[in-house]
Amino acid sequence: MAKIRGSIVVNVEKCKGCEVCMVSCPTGTIAMAKEVNGKGYNYAYPANPELCIGCANCAMVCPDGVITVYKTKI
Amino acid sequence: MEKELRLMKGNEAVAEAAIRAGVDGYFGYPITPQTEIIEYLMEANPAETTGMVVLQAESEVAAINMVYGGAACGKKVMTSSSSPGISLKQEGISYIAGAELPCLIVNVVRGGPGLGTIQPAQSDYFQATKGGGHGDYHLIVLAPASVQEMADFVSLSFELAFKYRNPVMMLSDGAIGQMMEKVYLSPQKERSKTVPEWATTGKPPTRERNIITSLDLDSNRQELFNRKILAKYNEIRENEVRYEEFKCEDAEYLLVAYGTSARVCQKSVQLAREQGIKAGLLRPITLFPFPSKRINELAGKVKGMLSVEMSAGQMVEDVLLAVNGKIPVFHFGRMGGIVTTPEEVVESLKLNFIGG
Amino acid sequence: MVEFSGIKEIIKPENLVYKKTKIMTDNVLSYCPGCGHGTAHRILAEIIDEEGLQSEAIGVSPVGCSVFLYYYLDIDWQEAAHGRAPAVATAIKRLLPDKFVFTYQGDGDLAAIGTAETIHACNRGENILIIFINNGIYGMTGGQMAPTTLPGMKSSTSPYGRDVKTMGNPLKMTDIVASLQGSYYVTRQSVHTPANVKKTKKAIRKAVQYQKLNKGTCLVEIVSNCPSGWKMTPVQANKWMEENMFPFYPLGDLKTPVE
């Protein structure tokens, strides 16, 4: 059976570390980085990329539109 | 093409002239003594003939903001009111000047301050020429002295407004707004189809988006903008002064008056000359830009000037500045809505200058 | 490093599911982290993109946190004085009736200083869309009480909580607008979860289509958060919003066209 696998790209410098994407992710892909970006925010990133299903929940709720989402069938 | 001769009230003439000038929109609110403007427009129903939008807004504040919206689309839009309503519009007027938008605001002045009276006055001179709203800006101010001028100045106002991207005020008064005179009306002009390149009309792929705003939090940029419009006002001061002289060639005393006061002073000049006093009248037509240069010239020829205004003395300050200490300058005027009489002016002239 | 990517093999143009619309410019949004403004802007921008309205849209921006809205969406904009956007939009739509005209306003703009303009534009049934961001506080000026601040809610001008005896009750402007005959479609939505984002997008898309019918004013209220003003983290703020704002300002359609 084909499995859906996703991959997100986060514009780390524009992320403000609000965590709303993390809360909306159904698979636990996203976590907040321990490092900060140039503005001092702990940015979001795909900490567990193999869990991503490309549902785009994160991108939909992101107030700053920093996430781009890709999806494919494997 | 032929002009049409009609007998009309000043207020009605403004309305009819606006339709004929191809004005795109009028937004107003009732207030005495200028309500005839919107009533005439509503009855004439130009929506059917020229497509002109006529809308009674919920307040003078709403009306001036409608003017802002229409002007920002590059349209010829106007509003009218009287003193208290013009006070309400000051925020909107400041925004219009700050966004460099063209429009016409008609003020049919009544006695103030506060709710005041409904009779004519000229006590909004400061408000009209020195700002009125906040910030460094000026209105171009035209002062009609007849029903004909109330009609003619509509087109002139829009011409100046679009030339300089600045709001224009027609500063009339309750007497001229209400009086009936002969007026020659221009034939109907078609509403303009030209769209200024700065206007918001929907962003086509061929240009950047147009943003109409007066906000800039970057002080350096804002100062550049302030300098830019200062240069604009200086250009207006250079090029757009308009005035009329009556018997000034050999005058020994000069009356300075606009609007209804100028009409009164014309009679005063005649009465004074009958009594052997060589009086003359300078009637500013533009109150901004003020005919300072001409008044300064005349200060070298006459012995004294009398600023005649229906107020506690507002234009007199600009006369004093223009005269720059060369000769004595006094003010005479009735207030409270009372129109000065020609005889009173002559008495004041004698009292101030001839030891009357 | 500017980008952090997931599994690189999947990142190919043909696999693209979601990308920020080109109607949003590349300017960094000035909003606080987690603020609903950004999400609301993006939804609006997506609709403008999908419906092909870039050359038809003329937006009227308010005074408030979103005063610089014109930096973020690539359409023609007019900046209105505080509260006056509906009057400005009235003139635009009446003079350019073929354009898509909308206002975007906060709670102070729409429900305090602009009460008269809001009610009268809706009463006249102006064919515009009013987007109303309601977060129960004045964000830009530092967190003061708004007409929509809840009873008991603290703000910098109600430091002991909103006391209805001296400060009145919150004003439900959307309900007032829905009661006017001139309003055509009135709804209340939110943008804090993907499901709500989808609903809000649907609501705005409907409003865009209704504007073409010339049937009256559409008002889409978006109950939103203000993490800075409420002094919470964005995630906490969203939870607080669900628990406190929604019972007072329930989501859903207040007025739908009877077709």
Image (tube, rainbow, N blue to C red):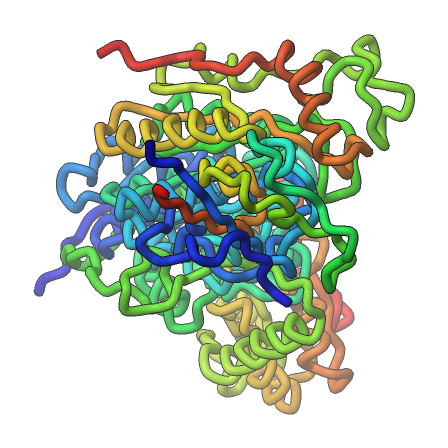
- Residue B332 shows up from this direction: no
Q: Residue at x 70, y 47 (%)?
A: A17
Residue B194 horizontal side relative to residue C240, left or right: left
Tell me where residue C98 appears, x and y as whole percent. Answer: 23, 43
Residue B17 horizontal side relative to residue B33, left or right: left
Q: Is residue C163 above or below residue B321?
A: above
Considering the image in quadrants, where does the N terminus of chain B appear? Answer: bottom left
Q: Residue at x 62, y 90 (%)?
A: B301
Considering the image in quadrants, where does the C terminus of chain B appear? Answer: bottom right
Q: Residue furthest front?
A: A1
Q: Is residue B97 above or below residue C242?
A: below
Q: Residue furthest right?
A: C160
Tell me where residue B351 appears, x and y as whole percent. Answer: 74, 65
Q: Residue at x 26, y 10 (%)?
A: C258
Q: Nearer the viewer, residue C49 or B80?
A: C49
**Residue C152 falls in image quadrant:** top right
Q: Is residue A21 above or below residue A35?
A: above
Q: Nearer the viewer, residue A72 or B157?
A: A72
- Residue C179 shows up from this direction: yes
Q: Residue at x 77, y 35 (%)?
A: C233
Tell me where residue C160 appears, x and y as whole percent. Answer: 91, 20
